[in-house]
Every structure is written in structure tokens, then in C-alpha cells.
Amino acid sequence: MARFEQEEAMGKKAKGNAARQWAMYTYIAGDNNLSSAGLSDIREMESAGASKNVHVAVQIDTVGEHEGSVRYEISLPDFAGKSHRTVIQRLPEQNTGKPKYLAEFARWAAERYPARHRLLVVWNHGAGFMHEPTRDIGYDDSSKGDALTMGELRWALEKAGFGKGPQGRVAVLGFDACLMNMIEVAYEFIGLADLVVGSQQTEPGDGWPYGEVVAALQGRPDPKAAAKRVVQVYDRSYRNTGQFNVTQSAIELARLPAAGRALDRLGRALHALLPARRNAVVEARVRTQGYEEPTYVDLVDLARNLRAAIPEGAVRAACDAVSAAVKASVLANRRYGGAVSRSSGMSVWFPLVRTDYATRRSEYVALRCTQDYPGWSKFLDRLLAA
């Protein structure tokens, strides 16, 4: 084992690792209270195993299981039909809240395990676009709760060579984390990935069913079919388990700018009606499908409620445009449970408390979606002005 670990060198492909149809690279930021769940997910990957069509690579940082981080390869089945995790490299303690370590893993995995299509999974707690203390994603308890912002995630993928770099776009960027599938988050990765898969609601502790995800990739699906399948197997894994209020969806990033433009249009239409229609706007927002993070709401349900509450034609037309654009962007959507029954697959930030808005405004207006389409944030500015 030690000889094999020493074989690794950044930027060099392992001998015999020819390009396959798919590769799944999973970055498990488990130096927190999800540590044991991360180890369980690696065992799920082993249950399916790699194949002639699929590479499976993972990096995990844990609490107490081992020193530092470990990079594993899931092997092809042995003579008994069993796959195993093989230690490829042991690393010193890493702060998974620093983007350089995600970049290093993603570049290492892409170069060592080439494939026609790549599924990159970022695994951890999640809180949408929000930064500390609520935290975004990839937080690390050993590093004072440091976490990755959306900008840092984008930087990490660019640094790894994705997008305009030599690796090209990631086929599917997966967030095995809570509250990540919102327009503002997905928009950050346009040009770096083709599809984003994640949850509008918080995820159960078991997260993705990795054995079924790997098995789905072994069928050689195209990226859209793979993203749909991840959504399906995730949803199915929680049916009849006593676990309710589960969501998972896949978003096509090439279609997302149209949703951004529609949201911008809606924001401008609402802005023009303030303060006269303030009460109607607030009442529509209160009726809208919400989530564990109380400032996140479903975007299609919001448009539906605003359309019903406000008679002006400009708002109604903008609401119709939002609904159509979001539905066109969401490739697959599953929800299970009455508390999430009106989930469309994409959320948006819409705080109602002035202090919530004031606390997050600076990071919100720095997001790419808000920079490109500022109409929504300008509406929030006026609605929540002190």
C-alpha cells in the first residue's frame, strides 16, 4: 500500500487509467458532525464499485478517523465480485473551507481518472449562498468553522482547469448538501458545468444513495439522463422510510440566463409598484412555499402567488415569464412530503425581515446572478428600506 501511495504525483495519470465514459469525483468535507456519514457513503460507493465504464475517486477529511485527508480509488470488482477502496494518497490536515484544497482534488482526480463525462460532488452541510456564521458549504470544524463561499467554489473549479481550462466543463456538479438549489447558487457555475443537481430543502443525514448513483453511471447515460437518474434514485431512496419533506432537482445551466432575465424583469415591475402594492407583495410572499432557511422560497410558487395578488399587467407578464423560464431550466424535479409539495426545483432569496436583508445584502449583491440581473436586489432594497 505504501508503494502505491508514493506512486501518486500531481498532474500525472496513473498507469492503466484510460478514459472511461464517466468518472465520479466526490469531495467529502467531513471534518464536522457528518464525519461518520461520509465514511458510510464511501462504503455505498464500494457496494457498486468502479467498472470499465466508470471511475470512482473520493477525498475525505474526517473527525478522528485518521490524520489529515485521504484520497481513495474505488476498485474494479475482484475475483469474488467485490470492489474495495484503495488508498491512493494520504495528505496532511486540510481546511476544506479553503478553495485551494478543492481545486487540488478536482485537478488531481480529473487528470488521474479521465472520462468523457464527469460528475463532481461537493459533500457537506450547505446553506445556499450564505456565508458564515450560517455557512455556505464545505465547512471544517478543525479550522474554526471555515467554509467555502460561492465565489470560492467557482474559483476552485476554474483553478482545477474546468470551464475554459484544459478540463472543459463538468457534466454534472452535484451538491450533496442542504438548501443549495437556488437560482443564485446555480448561476455561479454557468460556463463551468452543464448541470447542477441538489436540494431546495435540507437533506436527510444519509444524503445521496451513492451505490445507486454509481450504478446509474454504469449504464453509460448522457449527462442529462445521468442528472435525471440522480434525482430519481435520491427521491426513491427516501420513499417509505419515514423520511418526509425531501427535495432534489437538476438544473440546466445553459437555460438559466433566461430565468435570470425574467427575475430581473419581475423585480423591476414590483419596484415600480412600491410602496402602493407593498402589502399585496408581502402577503403573496407569506403564502409561498418555504424551506428550513426562512429567507428562501420556491421561485415558481412565488410567481404564482404574486400573479394572483397583483392585478397590474406588467407584474403578471413578468410572473408568467419567471414561471416559464424556471420550468424550462429545471430538467428534473422530485419532492416528497406535504411541507414541500409546491417545490418547483429552484429557490430564490426573499427575506421579509429588514435585519435579515441588511446582514446578507453585501454578499448577495456580489453574486454573479445579482451582478448580471440587479432588478431583484433593487426591488428588495426598496421593499426592505428602513
Image (spheres, rainbow, N blue to C red):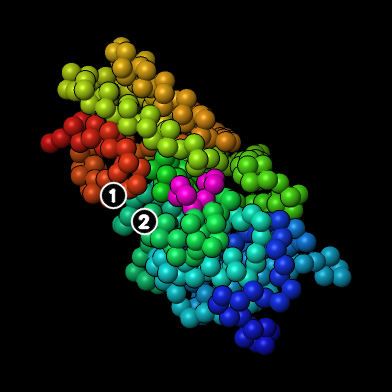
Above or below 63: residue 377:
above
The reply to whether residue 232 is visible in this rendering is: yes
Specify whether residue 357 is painted magenta. Answer: no
Residue drawn at 26 percent across, 24 percent down: 270
Along the horizontal axis of the image, is 195 left or right of 185?
A: right
Q: From mark 1 to mark 2, how far is it between C-alphas? A: 9 Å
Residue drawn at 64 percent across, 74 percent down: 13
Q: Quadrant of the N terminus?
A: bottom right
Along the horizontal axis of the image, is 179 left or right of 111?
A: left
Along the horizontal axis of the image, is 363 left or right of 65?
A: left
Instruction: Judge the density around disc 2: few (<14), some (14-19), many (≥20) Cα neighbours within 10 Å.
Output: some
How many numbered circles are shown? 2
Q: Which mark is residue 296?
A: none
Q: x, y percentage for residue 345?
A: 50, 35
Specify whether residue 194 is painted magenta. Answer: yes
Magenta-colored span: 189-197
Q: Earlier in the sequence, mark 1 or mark 2?
A: 2
The residue that label 1 is drawn on is 366
Above or below 246: residue 327:
above
Q: Quadrant of the C terminus?
A: top left
The secondary structure type at the circle numbered 1 is loop
The amino acid at mark 2 is Gly
Q: x, y percentage for residue 229?
A: 66, 43
Along the horizontal axis of the image, is 93 left or right of 275?
A: right
